[in-house]
Amino acid sequence: MLRLPPLIVCFFSCLVIQLHAQTKVVGECAITYDIKQITSNGDTSLLGQKEIFIKGNSCKTILKTPQLTQTLIFNTLQDTAIILKEIGLNHFLQYIQYASIIPAKLVASKKNGMISTILNYPCESITLSWADGTSMEVTYTTVILPTVTVYEQAFKEIPGLVLNYQLTTKAGDKILYSATKVDLSPITLNVFEVNKENYQQIN
């Protein structure tokens, strides 16, 4: 059996402790993702963009496609969330129960051996599988842990900032979300404000 000298053992132990200590909880950040569809032959086409804004317990996500802009605003300490939809000249506002935004039952999670780098952040990968046949491969960095991780409910147990995730449906359709920018600058409160006069409220 290979035995390491005490000095080397101490070095590796300190290295492991240091790596775990490098996780930084971030209370304010913005992440931008490109959304692409992956065809059966491996080609990709750009579907749109998703922006995430996090400040404390508040989160705002903006999904932009050529046909639709949809915004979700919520606070993890509150039960109600706001959805804004802009379709052409039509602007709609809807209040929903935030607690009801729950994915299908998670049946398996498998940590992958792959280690990669995205936007200069070292990343790990995990595959999540749900009862409805949907799966997701999530690539995340443990260097940063945002105060809100549930801008996708599937990320609730991910111990870091997700920089890449590929959703595969039961039918085999694949959608890839790839982070193109991470901004750790302070975010002003007006980012989460809504001028309700500009929207038609729906139930």
Image (cartoon, helix red, strand yellow):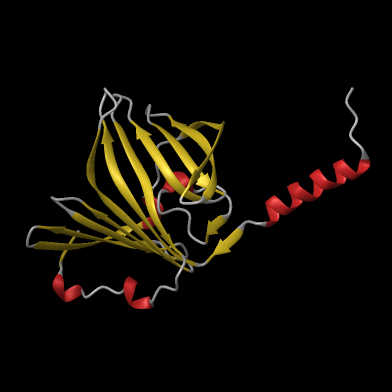
- State which quadrant residue 201 falls in: bottom left
Q: Camera-side residue: 49 or 116?
A: 116
Q: In this view, does 2 lie to the left or right of 144?
A: right
Q: Residue 8, image x and y in percent?
A: 86, 42
Query: Would residue 92 be seen by someone viewing this image from the given angle?
Result: yes
Residue drawn at x 73%, y 53% is 18
Q: Residue 157, image x and y in percent?
A: 54, 46
Q: In this view, does 180 lie to the left or right of 45?
A: right
- Considering the image in quadrants, where does the N terminus appear? top right
Q: Camera-side residue: 184 or 80?
A: 184
- State which quadrant residue 94 falls in: bottom left
Up-down relation of residue 166 to residue 194 (above or below): above
Query: Would residue 157 be seen by someone viewing this image from the given angle?
Result: no
Q: Is residue 25 left or right of residue 118?
A: right
Residue drawn at x 57%, y 49% is 159
Q: Camera-side residue: 71 or 49?
A: 49
Q: Camera-side residue: 90 or 41?
A: 41
Residue drawn at x 54%, y 51% is 160
- Considering the image in quadrants, where does the C terminus appear? bottom left
